[in-house]
């Protein structure tokens, strides 16, 4: 039975989009050290921007230049923005528009798709996940999109109209783009171009549509706490509001990634870092909120099968491996999540 509006209103502590409070509830307040240090719109021009226009050029010099830019960015930053990426701009626009409209639906309609234990995806309004004690100021909807046979169509909303068809096309386009970037990394390491993808056994994909409502006291809360992604490669579409931030020095300084209309923010996860034996970085990032505008972002997370073995694909002579013996991605993921929880708890102490 779907929750009614009164039930939804009773949950406003966990539904930031329904909250009319002038102060942030205590469950969302970060301690002093973890609060935002840089505004959501204090944009940095330092994060690399790379055109993919020549990534498959017949001109080897142009193609090599794109490869070098990608590799330099992922070695030194672990993140860059891709423009001219080849994904149909009408598809990108439709995905953003329909996602925005989903979060504008009445609360009881969104709560019909609430994700609970055992469900493959859905709407999440409570952010006590992975043992976190402080909540994130966001709501989100997640799809498990690849492998195709794992999709739970019952958890894919019928509204807004056209949502499912657009999501399917968007997921496929992101998977192709992610695979192409991983081919670049493989070739750069002197491997067969399918090496990164083959190490995944099968490339799984989860799409996460994030909605960060206006926050009455953004200086006290975070839309999403700092972390690195556990998977292989993430492709993020963000609107023009701003709020994604990265750190390269353990949180001492933060840079706000400048939004570019239609661009994708590309970053690697811990799996890719391990496959490259640390050559390519997994950047720490967080999301800050603001009191003027809500923000939307759509992340496509590509990651390996649970039983895929994680190990360095290539070692230079005398190079020490990051992982002494291969472990399954499931083991690696579980260990990372446990470690993240412990670190988060330590940071949340007064």
Image: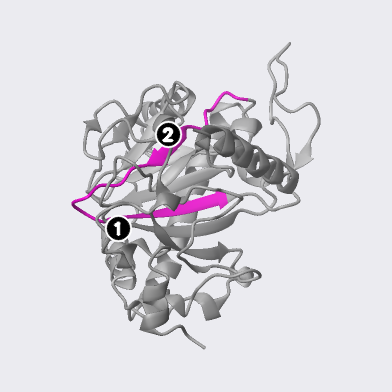
Task: Specify the color scheme.
Answer: one colour
**In the depicted view, which residue is nearer to us: 213 or 231?**
213
Residue shown at the point (70%, 24%) measured from the top left: 322
Give the mark, 2 or 1, whose residue is nearer the N terminus. Answer: 2
Q: Which mark is residue 213?
A: 1
Residue pointed to by mark 2: 34
Helix, strand, or loop for circle 1?
loop
**In the depicted view, which residue is nearer to us: 246 or 302?**
246
Vertical side of 134 occupied by 172: above or below: below
Q: Quadrant of residue 338?
A: top right
Q: Residues within 10 Å of mark 2 (few under 14, many from 20)?
A: some
Residue 294 inside the magenta-drawn segment: yes
* Total tally of numbered discs in the picture: 2
Q: Is residue 216 left or right of residue 346?
A: left
Distance between the alpha carbons at the discs numbered 2 and 1: 20 Å
Q: Which residues are magenta?
A: 278-302
Residue 212's x, y, as percent?
A: 33, 55
Q: Mark 2 or mark 1: which is in front?
A: 2
Vertical side of 314 occupied by 140: above or below: below
């Amino acid at each position: 039975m779907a929750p009614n509006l009164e039930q939804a209103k009773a949950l406003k502590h966990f539904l930031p989009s329904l909250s009319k409070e002038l102060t942030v509830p205590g469950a969302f307040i970060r301690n002093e050290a973890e609060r935002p240090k840089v505004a959501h719109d204090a944009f940095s021009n330092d994060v690399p921007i790379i055109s993919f226009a020549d990534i498959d050029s017949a001109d080897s010099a142009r193609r090599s230049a794109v490869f070098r830019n990608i590799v330099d960015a992922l070695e030194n930053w672990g993140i860059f923005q891709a423009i001219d990426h080849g994904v149909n701009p009408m598809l990108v626009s439709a995905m953003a528009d329909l996602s925005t409209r989903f979060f504008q639906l009445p609360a009881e309609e969104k709560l019909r798709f609430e994700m609970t234990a055992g469900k493959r995806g859905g709407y999440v309004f409570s952010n006590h996940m992975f043992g976190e004690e402080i909540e994130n100021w966001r709501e989100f909807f997640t799809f498990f999109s690849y492998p195709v046979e794992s999709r739970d169509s019952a958890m894919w909303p019928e509204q807004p109209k056209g949502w499912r068809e657009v999501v399917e096309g968007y997921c496929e386009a992101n998977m192709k783009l992610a695979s192409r970037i991983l081919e670049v990394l493989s070739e750069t390491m002197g491997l067969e171009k399918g090496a990164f993808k083959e190490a995944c056994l099968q490339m799984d994909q989860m799409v996460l549509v994030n909605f960060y409502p206006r926050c009455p006291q953004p200086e006290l809360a975070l839309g999403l706490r700092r972390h690195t992604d556990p998977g292989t490669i993430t492709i993020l579409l963000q609107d023009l509001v701003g709020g994604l931030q990265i750190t390269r020095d353990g949180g001492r300084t933060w840079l706000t990634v400048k939004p570019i209309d239609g661009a994708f923010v590309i970053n690697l996860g811990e799996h890719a870092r391990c496959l490259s034996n640390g050559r390519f970085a997994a950047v720490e990032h967080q999301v800050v909120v603001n009191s003027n505008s809500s923000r939307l972002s759509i992340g496509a997370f590509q990651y390996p099968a649970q039983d895929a073995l994680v190990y360095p694909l290539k070692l230079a002579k005398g190079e020490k491996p990051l992982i002494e013996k291969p472990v399954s991605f499931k083991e690696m993921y579980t260990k990372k999540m446990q470690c993240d929880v412990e670190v988060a708890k330590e940071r949340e102490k007064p």
